């Protein structure tokens, strides 16, 4: 893999991290504890608020896992191991990395 390709993947990973940070900032309000006045809000509204809170927390967990994958890919770049399958050691195809630069395995190993 040449320097230009690495730079392209690094830029994409950095951009993805920045997007996750922006999403985190937007999602913080949705994760706060649900406090509703039971006199003015019906039972279904409370259930809806609790469901929205649970969905926001699940989304936050997904973003956290994605952030970890991205940081691991950046660390592999720094260690000059980026683009190699963690299972078999072969090159990960550029098509796979174009779709997901944080991919850890080649297509063959991902299939199983």
Image (cartoon, grey):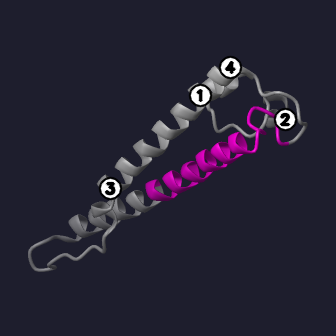
Q: Earlier in the sequence, mark 4 or mark 3?
A: 3
Identify the mark nearer the N-term, 2 or 4.
4
Identify residue for label 2: 109
Question: How far apart are labels 2 and 4 at the CA level?
Answer: 15 Å
- The foreground one among 72 and 65 is 72
Q: Nearer the viewer, residue 25 or 61?
A: 25
Magenta stretch bounds: 59-86
**Between discs 4 and 1, the one toward the N terminus:** 1
Dot 1 or dot 2, earlier in sequence = 1
Mark 1 or mark 2, whichever is nearer to me: 1
* In this rendering, position of residue 39 left or right of residue 107: left
Q: Which part of the image, by quadrant, shows the N terminus?
A: top right
Considering the numbered disc 3 on the image, is that residue within a helix, a strand or a loop? helix
Percent position (x, y) of residue 7?
59, 28
- Label number found at residue 40: none
**Residue furthest to the front:** 3
SS under mark 1: helix
Instruction: Determine whether, in the image, residue 60 is placed left or right of residue 7.
Output: left
Contact (CB < 8 A) between labels 2 and 3?
no
Of all residues, the one furthest to the right in this rendering is 88
N-term-proximal mark, 2 vs 3: 3
Look at mark 4 in the image and give the residue it sits on.
95
Q: Cα distance, mark 1 to mark 3?
A: 27 Å
Q: Residue furthest left?
A: 40
Pair 2/3: label in front: 3
Gap in angstroms between the C-alphas marked 4 and 3? 32 Å
- The image quarter in which residue 45 lies: bottom left
Residue 90 to residue 29: above or below = above
Return the mark for residue 25.
3
């Amino acid at each position: 893999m040449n320097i230009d390709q690495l730079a392209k993947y690094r830029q994409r990973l950095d951009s993805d991290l920045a997007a996750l940070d922006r999403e985190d900032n937007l999602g913080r309000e949705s994760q706060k504890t649900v406090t509703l006045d039971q006199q003015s809000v019906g039972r279904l509204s409370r259930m809806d608020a609790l469901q929205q809170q649970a969905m926001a927390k699940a989304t936050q967990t997904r973003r956290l896992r994605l952030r970890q994958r991205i940081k691991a890919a950046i660390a592999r770049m720094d260690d000059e191991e980026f683009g190699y399958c963690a299972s078999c050691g072969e090159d990960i195809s550029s098509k796979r990395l174009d779709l997901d630069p944080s991919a850890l395995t080649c297509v063959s190993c991902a299939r199983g």
